[in-house]
Structures are given as C-alpha cells and as structure tokens.
Image (cartoon, rainbow, N blue to C red):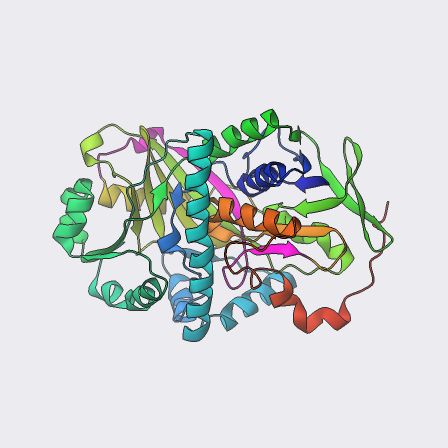
Amino acid sequence: MRIVVLGAGVIGVTSAWYLSRAGHQVTVVDRQPAAAMETSFANAGEISPGYSTPWAAPGIPQKALRWMFQRHAPLILRASADRTRAGWMAQMLRNCTADAYEVNKSRMMRLAVYSRECLESLRTETGIRYEERTQGTLQLFRDEKQVKAVAKDIKVLKADGVAYEELDVDGCIAAEPGLAHSRHLLAGGLRLPGDETGDCHIFTQSLAALAAEQGVTFLYDTAIEALESGAGRIEAVRTSAGRLTADLFVVALGSHSPALVAPFGVRLPVHPVKGYSLTLPIVDAARAPVSTVMDETYKIAITRLGDRIRVGGLAELAGFDLSLSPRRRATLAKSVGELFGGAGDLDRATFWTGLRPMTPDGTPIIGATGVGNLWVNTGHGTLGWTMAAGSARVLADMIGGRTPDIQADDLSCERYLRKSRSARPALEPAAA
C-alpha cells in the first residue's frame, strides 16, 4: 500500500519506519530541511514510562491559581480570548479527578512501557545509537508534602507492575552522587529504574537515514498546504512541491494536526503547550547527573546526554508563539543551578523552545479518524520521545489489519468524537 506520512518529527519518522518494515511504500513530507527540527529537536531527553503522568491531575486547578503569582511556576497561562484554548482547558479540568487521573495514567503507562520494549528491539535490530543511557529516572522531592503526594502514583505503578524504589535523602544521593552538594534541599525521591535517556534529535535523524536505506522517501523543504478529498476518502495532499496521491495518509504533525484535518469534520483536541530547554556543556562530571533527575517542584527534567546536560520542562499556554522568554530561562537555570551547581556552564548554554501537542487527558490519539483512509498519530504532549516507537508500532499493526500487542482501542479519537458524531459534516473536497 502507498502511504504518505505527514510530519518528520520522532512520531512521523518512527511511523514511517514501522510502516515500511510492514511492507508498505512510504513517503514522508515535512516543511523543514531535515528530520526532527521542531518539537523533537531539543526536548528533555527522557524515555520515562514510569513518569508517564497526565498534567490533568487532582489539585491542579488549585495549583494553577497559585502558580499565576509565582515567578518560577511550572505552568504558565497567558491571557487569551481563543475559544479553542478555552474549550481545551475545560476538557482538561474535567480530567482533574482522582478517577480520571488513575485511568489516564494507567493508559499512558501501558503505551509507554510497550514503547520502551519496542525501542529496545529496534536498538538491537539496527544497532542505532543516540547517546542512550539505561540508568533510570529519579523523581526528586524538596518537601514532605511532595513525598506524601506520590502515593497516588505508586498505586498505579503497583497495579501496572512497574518497578520503583522509594528513596530517602541518602538513597537519592547514592543514585545521583552529584546531588551531594544540594543535600539541604532534598526530602526524598522516587526512582524508576526501568526508565532511559537519549538524544531524540540524534535518534530521529539516524532512524530517518536507516528508513531511507530501506526505501522510504523523504520530501524535505516541502510545505503541506491541504488535504484533498473525493468519493468519501482522501485522494491527495497538496504541497509546495505539487500534489501527492496515496492509498492512505497518516497525519503526524503534532500541534499542527488539528488544522489539517478539521475541514473534514475531524475535531482533534490537541493544543500546543510550549516547553523550553537549556543545553549546557559539562565542566565538572563529578557534579553532573548520571541519568535523569525530575525536579518535582518546577516540573523540570535534568538529563545527562553525553558531555552535555539537557534541562527541559515548563508548560506555557501561548498558542503557536515560539519566542524565547528570559524568565523561563531563569527558571531552568535556577533548577539545575540549585541541584547540580557547577556541573555545567550556564554561560555557554543553548536556549530552545518547542510546542508539545497535548490532549486534555494526556493520552495521544492514534488510529483511524472515521474519514476513509485518513489516520492520525499525534497528541503525545511531553512524552513523544517516550511513546514514539510503541505508538508507531501500534499504528502500523492497525493499518495492516493486525491486532496490536497491547490494548489500543482507547487510544483513538473516538473517545473524543462519540458525542459529536451526529454533528460531523459529510466529507467535502478541500478548497483549492
């Protein structure tokens, strides 16, 4: 089958890889000059099944109000009259219950754990390297309130059979010796030994090269303008390089996915959530993290990537704005400076921002859309790197008519579209 994948981030490239391995003829289209040049470029570097946690959680509405008055808040809400954003936020708030949190976290972890298994197999099969480390994640708590609050997460970890270790301060320092200099800031931690780290940008570009070797065509520097339909299905995608036809189309455009499919009545509640990162050269390896430390206070991940430290996190609702905020840089610098002071050179740090495609419940949207041959793989939020391989494998299995290795019926957009199905318009050709 001829398949066009729209988007060459980590989700699009892994989708292309598994679809090609399943025997399909695949073309990938992206507006950038190479793979992984947007959201996948400088993310936090975590592959964290154990830390796969929805932002929509009990207590978040109250915390969000307090964060509005904090200089170093992990969540930033910009004032806006955008009705789409307001609707998305309302859906997210409806998921801030204990029952919804447990369901959403368990669903996310199911996919994330499977994705780690797929990544391990892919690494063994191809020998791909991407500055990977398999030494776990340490979720670090600065006060006793955070230590007690993790009980709800441990409940889900136990239910899903995910390995974890509850650590006191000495245990945290044993796992991450660089924290010895910040002992006075620590209250305890939760270590997830099954988590990994790695450079998503290096991985995606390397996998794209391997995919090209096995026959996948990559059309870079090619703007995606619109989908064209007829006879109840998508016939082509119109691009700056011309019109491309195929038997099936996969939309993996992250935060830009909803706009492309909206003309056909497919309403994807995927909203851009802006994140930031700093990348520091290591100047004192003994003070640097061994793997990933998640600073629970600021929701910031501090990750060792070769001879660099990647500091990533924060969540800002600012639409598609990609401006770099000095205030957000200060928050990232504060977190790494307090916990791993002297490990990296902040004066030589590279500052970056990207848009994570977030769903209200935290779970990505994978599968058919109900419109002929139009499929989606999007909405992974902060966990695209964690869930990429598993999401792509699930998608390839579903497209090929095979039953996925994990439960996947609750990953499709059906969970959002059921109530509005009767209001969906008939498929109409896109305007020229």
Q: Quadrant of the C terminus?
A: top right
Q: Which residue lies furthest to the left in this view?
A: 170
Q: Which residue is drawn at 49% across and 36% down?
A: 41
Q: Is residue 352 located in the magenta-colored stretch of the structure?
A: yes
Image location (x, y in percent) of residue 374? 72, 51
Q: Is residue 392 visible?
A: yes
Q: Is residue 104 located in the magenta-colored stretch of the structure?
A: no
Q: Is residue 250 left or right of residue 119?
A: right
Q: Residue at x 37, y 31 (%)?
A: 131
Q: Is residue 327 visible?
A: no
Q: Is the residue 428 above or below the residue 210 in the image?
A: below
Q: Is residue 60 left or right of residue 29?
A: left
Q: Which residue is drawn at 35% across and 28% down?
A: 348
* Quadrant of res 253: top right
In the image, the segment drawn in magenta is 341-368
Name the one closer to the observer, 21 or 371: 21
Q: Residue furthest top?
A: 213
Name the one closer to the observer, 340 or 400: 400
Q: In which quarter of the image is the N terminus?
A: top right
* Quadrant of res 222: top right
